[in-house]
Amino acid sequence: MSTIRWTEDRTARSARWHSENATPPPARVVVADDRMPADTAHRLAAGGTALLWRGDYHNARHLLRAMGRRLDRAAPRRPGATALDMYRAHRAARGQRARVLGRLVVLLDAAYALDLRRAPDVRAACAEAYGPGRGPMVVSLTELLGVIGARQWRVRGVEVPALGARVHPHYGVFSPVRGEYVDLVARAPLPGRRTAFDLGTGTGVLATVLARRGVGRVTATDISARARACARDNVRRLGLGNRVQVADGPALYPEGRADVVVCNPPWLPGSPSSALERGVYDADSGMLRAFLTGLAAHLEPGGEGWLILSDLAERLGLRREDEVTEAIAAAGLHVVDRMDTHPNHRRARDTTDPLHAARGAEVTSLWRLSAP
């Protein structure tokens, strides 16, 4: 083990640092291999030192799990805390965990090959996630494992019963593994079938459901270029290119008006720390409010806006119980109806995770909104 800097390591000298969650490059790096004890790795990583792994690939994964166990044991317990206090402490602990485990890093060559003993071929997965290679780069092993997992999701796809088909999520695009909100869109009565907008389309799943229900022209938008590419891929796979158009730019609303405007914003107020978290956290409820304030100007006469939202934020104390209805009224909108469903995900046994504990009673709703 020797203390190095990026520019002083012979094989990593020309490598660039890459992090999807914008983590800055580490200031101090040591070379690590199979001889490094987990206690040493945990101590160095917790102190801010990155570990450039040169050993066996599977041993690196074992080391990650061992470091994770040490972090779990060190996590404080807060009996009697409120749901909001538990949530904040839990998210802070998850952030610290991500930072520490993210300091175990690996080197990818210009073709995204991983030169470690027993390492898998990660070139296709990295090319799909990162695009064409631009020379050697250093990434955290946790990020690389996420890239590998995303490749598997993309190949297998996710079964969507409302479509009778699979959608294929790309790296960094939220996967529709929880299907209750898709079923709500499949069941809600359509006020018209000529046009629809799907705002924040992600994989394009709701846009394709609307097209399968007979809407003649659906326009899908998303601020993420990855999501737009993913939606186009799924529209093509499902043979719906003549009915679903994915907008080119990052605007929330496309030009014009529609009979139905669907929006499934991130359900929790908060700042996302990675590309994937943008599907979970909505900073200052910005997307929710932008949807509501812009809806009236984009509805055809007699049209409806469908807001799909969970009450998880209210159960965690992140949003007041009447905050959504107040925002709807402030936008000059009327609630036509509200369709509720209980998620069918497994109830988590770990009640120390406030997100899992709150989901036991969670309700997902489709609000049917109209404008004067």
Image (cartoon, rainbow, N blue to C red):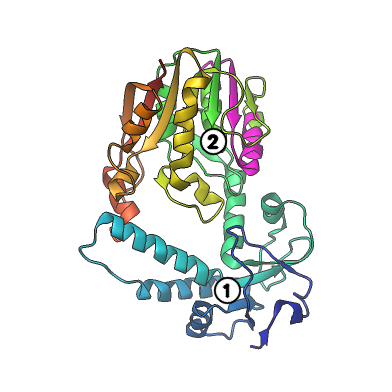
Magenta run includes residue 222 = yes
Image quarter hosting the N terminus = bottom right
**In the rendered structure, which disc, 2 or 1, sits on the residue that comes first in sequence?**
1
> What element does badge 2 sit on?
loop
The disc placed on residue 60 is: 1
- Judging depth in this view, the residue of 264 and 153 nearest the camera is 264
Give the x, y percent position of residue 319. 33, 44
- Name which residue lies at 29% across and 59% down: 85
For residue 170, above or below residue 18: above
Q: Residue furthest bottom?
A: 2
Q: Which quadrant of the figure has residue 314?
A: top left
Residue 162 visible from this viewpoint:
no
Residue type at tag 2: Gly
Q: Over which residues does the magenta segment extend?
A: 211-235
- Position of 98 compared to 248: left or right? left
> What element does badge 1 sit on?
helix
Q: Identify the residue under disc 2.
A: 200
Residue 201 visible from this viewpoint:
yes
Residue type at tag 1: Ala
Give the x, y percent position of residue 316. 30, 50
The disc placed on residue 320 is: none
